[in-house]
């Protein structure tokens, strides 16, 4: 025992730490406790084909049900999780929980559904990612193609050559990959062409501009055309109005996610539809 080491051995206070550093250590410890005390939650937001009216999957979005401070959104704790490395543990929890939930929905008969899980850059670049994903899919007996891992355009383009290798490995095990927040980074289209992804999610900044007088319809339709030429599924994020929905459908994009259809909700508020494609006896 030294009076400097916390119970878990990592909450070591050093007088030289800056006030910011100290609160980071506190937050790191709090996050660690949150994970082990089961305070994290996943909310799910449907991904909908607005033309057929069918929900094709859900995106898992993490929340922290803090015992004193209430429900916290990721912007309040993901930056700290990333700075402290706690994101790896958090990310493992998210992947496991999301796959568990998908397995439950599949058991309820809705086996057409997919689940989208966000990966932070550190998780994406972690050596053990392929092993973790494989093991989790096996644990819940899920078809790999029902899992869609989302990485942001910025993450994908950080080390493009390495990203391509990781994406090849993910492709080899059969999971899908979405490029999230597309259009906000500055990716070289040449590199994007080499990224073996399966889906492109248009950042909600583009969707948000629909209907404003500075809308650039060329840009949106270019992105949609690009995705189609690359055989990528295209998803519009942050669709908030009927006007935006109609505009996107007219441009040929009919898979949407956004408040207009549904906010992210806890799984208790979701009823999946079984036997969507009934087979005649
Ligand atoms: P994202 O992956 O791009 O997720 C979409 C975000 O947009 C979500 O915010 C969602 O609630 C919000 N959103 C959806 N529809 C609308 C809309 O119509 N209007 C507006 N204004 N917002 C909409 P959320 O849940 O706060 O998550 C923010 C970001 O945090 C996510 O962006 C993702 O980058 C990250 N994140 C969330 N959960 C996880 C996770 O489990 N792991 C990791 N690594 N990152 C996560
Ligand atoms: Mg996402
Ligand atoms: Mg996004
Ligand atoms: Mg985002």
Image: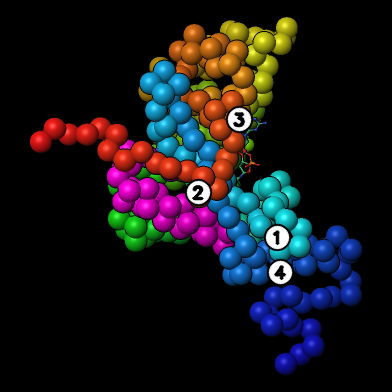
Mark 4 in CB contact with mark 3 (< 8 angstroms): no
Task: Give the mark toward the camera: 4 or 2.
Answer: 2
Magenta stretch bounds: 89-116
Residue 49: x and y in percent read: 43, 24
Q: Which residue is mark 2?
A: 267
Spot occupied by residue 163 in the image (x, y as percentages of width and height): 49, 41
Circle 4 — which element?
helix
Q: Which residue is mark 1?
A: 66
Closest to the camera, between mark 2 and mark 1, is 2
Q: Earlier in the sequence, mark 3 or mark 2?
A: 3
Q: Which residue is mark 4?
A: 29
The quarter of the picture where the N terminus appears is bottom right
| The magenta stretch spans residue 96 | yes
User: What quarter of the picture does the C terminus occupy?
Assistant: top left
Task: In the rendered view, tell whether residue 143 sits above or below residue 97.
Answer: above
Closer to the camera in the image, 140 or 128: 140
Q: Vertical placement of 267 versus 235: above or below?
A: below
Q: Are marks 1 and 3 in contact (CB under 8 Å)?
A: no
Residue 53 falls inside the magenta stretch: no
């Amino acid at each position: 025992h030294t009076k400097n080491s916390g119970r878990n051995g990592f909450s070591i206070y050093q007088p030289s730490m800056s006030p910011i550093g100290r609160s980071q250590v506190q937050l790191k410890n709090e996050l660690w406790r949150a994970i082990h005390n089961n305070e994290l939650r996943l909310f799910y937001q449907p991904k909908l084909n607005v033309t057929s009216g069918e929900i094709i999957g859900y995106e898992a979005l993490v929340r922290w049900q803090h015992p004193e401070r209430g429900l916290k959104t990721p912007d309040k704790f993901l930056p700290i999780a990333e700075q402290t490395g706690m994101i790896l543990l958090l990310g493992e929890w998210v992947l496991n929980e999301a796959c568990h939930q998908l397995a439950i929905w599949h058991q309820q008969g809705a086996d057409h559904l997919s689940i989208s899980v966000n990966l932070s850059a550190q998780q994406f670049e972690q050596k053990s990612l392929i092993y973790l994903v494989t093991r989790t899919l096996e644990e819940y007996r899920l078809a790999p193609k029902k899992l869609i891992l989302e990485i942001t355009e910025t993450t994908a383009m950080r080390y493009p050559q390495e990203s391509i290798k990781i994406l090849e490995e993910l492709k080899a095990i059969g999971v899908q990959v979405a490029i999230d927040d597309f259009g906000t980074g500055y990716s070289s289209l040449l590199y994007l062409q080499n990224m073996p992804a399966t889906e492109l999610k248009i950042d909600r900044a583009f969707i948000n501009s629909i209907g404003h007088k500075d809308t650039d319809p060329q840009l949106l339709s270019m992105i949609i055309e690009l995705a189609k030429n690359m055989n990528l599924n295209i998803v519009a994020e942050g669709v908030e109005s009927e006007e935006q929905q109609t505009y996107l459908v007219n441009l040929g994009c009919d898979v949407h996610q956004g408040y207009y259809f549904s906010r992210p909700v806890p799984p208790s508020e979701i009823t999946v539809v079984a036997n969507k494609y009934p087979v005649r006896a």
